[in-house]
Amino acid sequence: MTELENCKSCGRLFVRVSSPYCPDCLKKQNEMYETVYRYIRKQENRQSTVTEVHEATGVEINLIYQWIREGRLQTAVFPNLGYPCKSCGKMIQTGTLCDNCRHQLEHDIAREQTMGDAAMKQKGKTYHT
């Protein structure tokens, strides 16, 4: 189903089919992607970091991060590419949180559940007259 939406990049109103970007911005992004891909595909540039790719191509770092998250730029082929963890900023290649932040979050959730269970048991022992 199609709907009217503002382009995520330029703000122009367009009929959204699948992408949150208008056709013009989508075309520009695809051209920038091709520029980045041509650069890192060269043997001497395969070990480049995101910052190095940005400096060499002029493409925004956030767009490069987006393409890595989407899987368009594969970290198996380009091992030094990554994006920051949403919590601490450490460079990662999959997911939204690094292993340390994910483990900390899991630990915090387990602790809260344990405390909640203990509170429910305590609450169950209260008698009202």
Image: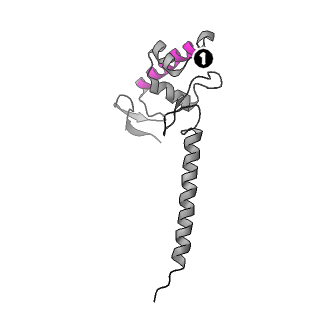
Establish if 2 lies above or below 43. Answer: below
Where is residue 21? Give x, y as percent. 43, 30
Tell me, yes or no, whether the highlighted magenta stretch contains residue 37.
yes
Where is residue 72? Give x, y as percent. 57, 26
Establish if 5 lies above or below 78. Answer: below
Where is residue 115? Give x, y as percent. 54, 63
Establish if 83 lies above or below 54. Answer: below
Where is residue 82? Give x, y as percent. 55, 27
How has the structure been colored for display?
one colour
Mark 1 lies on residue: 47
97 left or right of 26 in image:
right
Residue that appears at 59% across and 40% down: 99
Q: Secondary structure at mark 1?
A: loop
Tell me, yes or no, whether the highlighted magenta stretch contains residue 75.
no
Q: Quadrant of residue 28?
A: top left
Residue that appears at 39% across and 33% down: 8
Q: Quadrant of residue 124?
A: bottom right
Mark 1 residue type = Gln
Q: Residues in magenta? A: 25-40
Of helix, strand and loop, which mostly describes the magenta segment? helix
Q: Residues within 10 Å of mark 1 (few under 14, many from 20)?
A: some
Q: Residue furthest bottom?
A: 129
